[in-house]
Amino acid sequence: MTVQQTNIPSEIESDDDFRARLRTFFTDHHPGKPPRDPKERLAHQKAWNATMFDAGFSGPSWPKEFGGMELSFAHQVIYQEELARARVPGPMGTGLGIAAPTIIRYGTQAQKEEFLAPMLRGDKIWCQGYSEPGAGSDLPSLRTTARREGDEYVVNGQKVWTTQATNADVLFTLVRTGTQESRQKGITYLLIDAHAPGVEVRPLRDITGGAGFAEVFFDDVHVPVSHRIGEENEGWPLVRTSLGHERAAGAMNQAAVYRRVLDELTALARERGRASEPLIRDQLADFEIRVRIMRYNAARIISDILTKGEPGAASSVSRMLITAFEQDLHEFAIGLLGPAGLLTKDSPHAVQRARWLTGFLRTRASTIGAGTSEIQRNTVAEQVLKLPHDPGMPPR
Amino acid sequence: MSFSFTAEQEELRQLVRRFCEEKSSSEHVRRLMDSDDNRDDKIWSQMADQLGLQGLSIPEAYGGSGFGPVELGIVLEEMGRTLLVAPYFSTVAIAGQTLALSDDEAAKQRWLPGIADGSLTATLAIAEESGSWELDSVETTAAQAGDEWSLTGTKMYVLDGATADLLLVVARAGDELGLFAVDGAAAGVTRSKLDSVDLTRDLGRVELDGVSAVRIGSGDATEMLVKATDLILAAFAAEQIGGAAKCLEMAVDYAKIREQFGRPIGSFQAIKHKCADMLLEVESGKSASYYASSVVAAGDHESSIAAALAKAYCSTAFTHAAKENIQIHGGIGFTWEHDAHLYLKRAKSSELLFGSPARHRERLADLVGI
Ligand SMILES: Cc1cc2nc3c(=O)[nH]c(=O)nc-3n(C[C@H](O)[C@H](O)[C@H](O)COP(=O)(O)OP(=O)(O)OC[C@H]3O[C@@H](n4cnc5c(N)ncnc54)[C@H](O)[C@@H]3O)c2cc1C
């Protein structure tokens, strides 16, 4: 699939012109509020992804060849700012954040052509099949196997907590091609067609009552070798590929989103006549400080990238700051509402469709998914502060 | 708004860092802390003559080099790292900035050049027995007799108040709040050093009994003092985050070399997590401090928000880092010989001076309309 884009800013387009063009586009094509029903919601998001893609407003850091905008970092920041301002979501999906950068970096030309644009346009939903029942934080102990048979792999095993698996078209997975003892040296990165025979997806109900993730079972699933990223047994180093600078630019967007959430919470406290209580005010002021620091941190990361080419230490602490913030914020909100905060979204008496309760439950995952906060702190301690490696842990 | 520093500013940082590391070693700090002096005269004049640090943020017209709060923040962050014992904060960050803000040309001509060349030390006295820096709690009175003013009242917790050559005193002049200059050695001034926990910083008590004073500026000084307070708070936050960063470094360095159970303690997760959390606060505090430094010069609503935020956050971060630093050092961290306690004491005093974090959160809530 070759992609022709017309909306990509040319080298000479000024920041203001680019900003204005984004602003017009987001205003004219605003997708509106996402529907509540999960199926309709997905369709809504897919349609919005397609609209953005077709207009050439997708994939800020991606190569133009695959439908991206190939923006300079400064333009990526503007893009994120305008997304936040327009209150529209960026192109979404686990694949975009995690699988795409891996394919862009390590994939063959054929793989890039086959997978990237449809992922960005939202035509194909991707999900991440890394974790297994016995392999969470200790991912290198995973047991799902792939046995080579000619130009195919035959996959057997089980994945778990796979977000979006029920809607997925493609699973990007880690499978064992070496011995169990070889640990991370015997792991291969495979893209598996979620509709292939032998793939079974069983929705898992989560803490919110919804089914955001699922178990995935592989029973003699045949996968073409051409859907392997990188070399056999050498999938592990690919896991850490990230969007780097695009993620840093996204930090601005996140700060803007939480700014809004906090404003809504403050308004709620005021509405309920609680905002003048000293303890409530102290808490709100503390959140105010943290949400502003989120923006300052983002601005500092961006500024460092622009002047020094590197994001600096602030980037490594952003996630810790945000995860603790969103957990504290939602828990505080329920407390503010008192027993009314306990009503679920099915209750006609629920305040604001029970968003704070749902948030309180949902954000339990913030310190678990995508690496627990314990693992994250270990990593920061070792990689940023250079503290000695824990001899009980496998080498990096 | 840039959060990064220019090459020139980075150079300034390196210069000041080297100077402080050399001149404010643990040995120096301890020598001054045990003496009655709050500075080493030789170092003080080197700071002025060789580095021009006292004049850094003083306008060129008055003998300074005319830099702003960003450069001052850099210098203070570095001084905070080594607990430099000197009346720099009081003289330059407090009195110098306050004077420079006033519209009183004569006062500026008279005192700023002395501050800039290091020949004059100065401070600002706001708080009284109540321990509050709120302007409306000031009770010291100023009475006018012809062209002369005379002040009566007692000021507390005045940084370097017992030694400063020049005291800037906030007092009530009828319905107005005024700023007055008092010669530290004037008749009717009785001052003493307060025995307080932080041995690296002098706090003074200043009794004023009908002391003759010069009024600085005309009309009510409240607005000017609010602006000055923002500048002072931003500078203070910079000093504190420098101290916090140093505590983190001390803890990390020690965790790499101290071995227990046959391995460095830094390989234990409990220690790693403490350090990672400190890093979170230090980096966030730097962002808050750099932001505050870059906006306070404007003197608008945003500067008050940024300054309150930075003071609240950096104070908390510093105290936390200082406590964790002691914990990570174990028994050694509790000994007098180790510097960890000096940082804890500096942190605690900085936390409570110029308004506690809770007080600044309250102000912030007011300012942002919570
Ligand atoms: C909402 C949600 C969505 C998810 N989506 C996906 C997905 O799409 N794809 C996917 O592959 N996975 C997904 N996961 C799984 C997630 O990556 C794992 O849950 C996570 O890596 C932790 O693994 P675990 O659950 O097995 O916990 P464990 O690893 O068993 O950890 C349990 C506890 O022990 C602690 N612990 C473990 N090892 C250490 C250590 N060395 N030091 C200190 N503490 C340790 C952990 O921090 C945690 O507190 C999702 C999880 C959630 C909650």
Image (cartoon, rainbow, N blue to C red):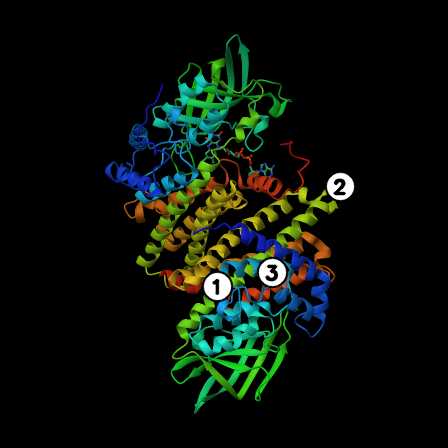
In the picture of the structure, the residue carrying the numbered disc 2 is: B262
Look at the numbered disc 2 and say if its residue's Cβ is closer than 8 Å to ligand 1.
Answer: no
Q: Secondary structure at mark 3?
A: helix
Instruction: Please say whether residue B278 is visible from this viewpoint.
Output: yes
Residue A10 coordinates in the image, percent (x, y): 35, 33
Q: Is residue B179 above or below residue B34?
A: below
Judging depth in this view, the residue of A186 and B86 nearest the camera is: B86
The subunit letter for the residue under badge 2 reads: B
- In whole angstroms, how far apart are the C-alphas of marks 3 and 2? 35 Å
Sequence-earlier tag: 1 or 2: 2
Quadrant housing the C terminus of chain A? top right
Q: Is residue A373 above or below residue A106?
A: below
Residue B15 coordinates in the image, percent (x, y): 62, 56
In the displayed structure, does residue B127 sit left or right of residue A169? Answer: right
- Kind of residue at badge 1: Ala
Q: Is residue B21 above or below residue A229?
A: below
The subunit letter for the residue under badge 3 reads: B
Answer yes or no: are tags 1 and 2 on the same subunit: yes
- Kind of residue at badge 3: Gly
**Residue at screen point 41% across, 26% down:** A126
